[in-house]
Amino acid sequence: MTNRAWHLKSRPQGLPTMDNFELKPLDDRALADGEVRVRNGWLSVDPYMRGRMNDVKSYVPPFEVGAPMEGGAVGKVVESRSPHFAEGETVFHMMGWREEAVAAAERFNKVPPLPVADQEWLGNLGLTGATAYFGLLRVAQAKEGDIVFVSAAAGAVGSAVVQIAKAKGMTVIGSAGGAEKVAWVEALGADAAIDYKAEPVVQGLQRAAPKGIDVYFDNVGGEHLDAAFAAARNNARFAICGMIESYNSGSGHAFRYIMRVIAARIMLKGFIYTDYLPEMGDFYRDMGGWVASGKVKGRETVRDGIEAAPEAFLDLFRGGNIGKMLVKL
Amino acid sequence: MTNRAWHLKSRPQGLPTMDNFELKPLDDRALADGEVRVRNGWLSVDPYMRGRMNDVKSYVPPFEVGAPMEGGAVGKVVESRSPHFAEGETVFHMMGWREEAVAAAERFNKVPPLPVADQEWLGNLGLTGATAYFGLLRVAQAKEGDIVFVSAAAGAVGSAVVQIAKAKGMTVIGSAGGAEKVAWVEALGADAAIDYKAEPVVQGLQRAAPKGIDVYFDNVGGEHLDAAFAAARNNARFAICGMIESYNSGSGHAFRYIMRVIAARIMLKGFIYTDYLPEMGDFYRDMGGWVASGKVKGRETVRDGIEAAPEAFLDLFRGGNIGKMLVKL
């Protein structure tokens, strides 16, 4: 069995290229006492990883040049020298971008006993779903009857937001790029969808939400955020999850409507789902129920083999995925 | 006695000019039952009034072209047909920009029984002080030990924020334009001051707050807000009171650091002091005490006579005031 890992070869300027990545074997070594060996079955690639490629202190430390990269992964225990893990158990952990993870037992988490496919622990029941759940319900405090706008609504987090909002009795407007994605957003149950490639977002939102919006779940920043400022009703709440529009460019959007923050008393807050780890029990209860009942459905864009990981990651910035982008090993 | 009022002659494009204003006599009329006549002694001019000159629905309706303008004023009752008001009483009301206000008794408020000069009810004990108090303590939830940054710190609201923050045991950094204003901000007790005309705000803030900021009180928007994004510590709170930089231009600032909202979990909220009217009792108790003890001091830039009102207003956008800009009739 090979054990290769993608290493950060150099820090990208702007949009990363294949030259920034290098696939190299990891040293084969015996387990120390208390360690576990996990064969990864699925790797997650997520937009936030772009930030870790810069040499900037953020909420997670930057990737080191020359070292293996990290990210969400699900795998099976193949060898254990810890009393807490047995061979064959399914675990979630953050040592992705590689075929095999070897580390102290504390760095692995057993998945809860729910009858779902392994990759669901990277999607609706993993960091993707938790980000949608806590952002919508805790950060933006969205409630029944609210009019909710979500950008990148065909993406992994956005499509979960659409479905959670519908499960909770909200009106939902989603934006996405292109007819295929818009159709998928509508199929998820959104009350209206905006194709941001076909019309300015401000205009689309005026049509889709003539009364304005109470909540904005931001995955994109820039033009979408500005349109949300324009459409906000009094006391609107914005959960700022991501700003993919700016991750590579680094340049700033010129906001035309930001002054509406004052008149409409908009509340805007950034978050990371890990801020809510103490409340994961609520998440597993609610989201587990919705996934089991089919109220929240996943859709996956799957790439095969460790070799495909960087291209899968780069595709996130080209709009190449519908739903959760995964690499299957 | 003349009774003239400034009318909005035409809606300004960009920075207003004298051509947008017209001073005309108001009709003289006898009081109806329940009405009160007040001779204004002091008029307030405030940056927010610029927004009311546009034909845009906001938290207060736009001024009508051809009609007298409105704004904070303090005066004495000179005639009353209401049992609630007696001749000679001092009242605060929103029928400024004119020499005499005639209206139903409900539109006037008696000032609380505190031994202060009349114009204080437009300054630290009026909408200026209430804006500073509620923005800092309620919206941004600033508390002892916090590092607070405030823009336009030599202005009416900003100088109140500096002093309230010091009275509450916070570290305060104020920004202002030019040496005279910076000296005044330091004299108010600020721990550090930034001259935004002498250096980029981002750079000034790195020097003045090397550990970053917990709270930002925004009167300016644009470059100042961007610098606050850059300097924000985790869980920083921004109270958005005004964005004077954009009131006339209407063009958007290109924010370079807005993505830090996510990593630092910044909370940002717009507000108007009237959101906190039910809590005015707290404000009068605290601010009344600070004003009486000299912990919060006012400074005024006074223009004489009703004729001076538009120029006083326009000077707000040229940085022509230190402290509260007032028109004395």
Image (cartoon, coloured by chain):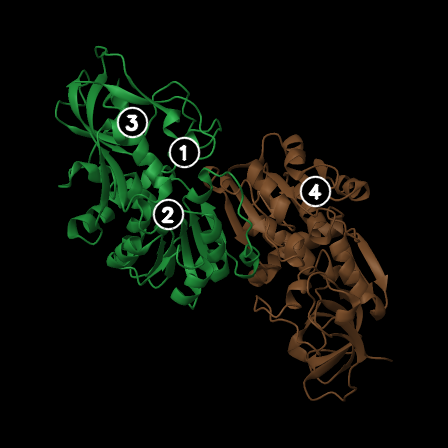
Chain colours: A green, B brown
Which element carries disc 2, helix, strand or loop?
helix
Residue A47 sits in quarter: top left
Residue B43 sits in quarter: bottom right
Residue at x 69%, y 88% (from the top left corner): B33
Can you tell which of label 2 and label 3 is closer to the viewer? 3
State the separation of the CA atoms marked 3 and 1.
14 Å
Which element carries disc 1, helix, strand or loop?
helix
> Can I make out residue A234 in this image?
no
Judging depth in this view, the residue of A144 and B21 nearest the camera is B21
**Horizontally, is B146 left or right of B177 in the view?**
left
State the separation of the CA atoms marked 4 and 2.
34 Å
Can you tell which of label 4 and label 3 is closer to the viewer? 3
**Which residue is tagged 2?**
A135
Chain identity of mark 1: A
State the separation of the CA atoms marked 4 and 1.
34 Å
Q: Quadrant of the N terminus of chain B?
A: bottom right
**Which residue is tagged 4?**
B175
Local packing at callout 1 (Cα closer than 10 Å; few below 14, some 14-19, many 20+) is: many
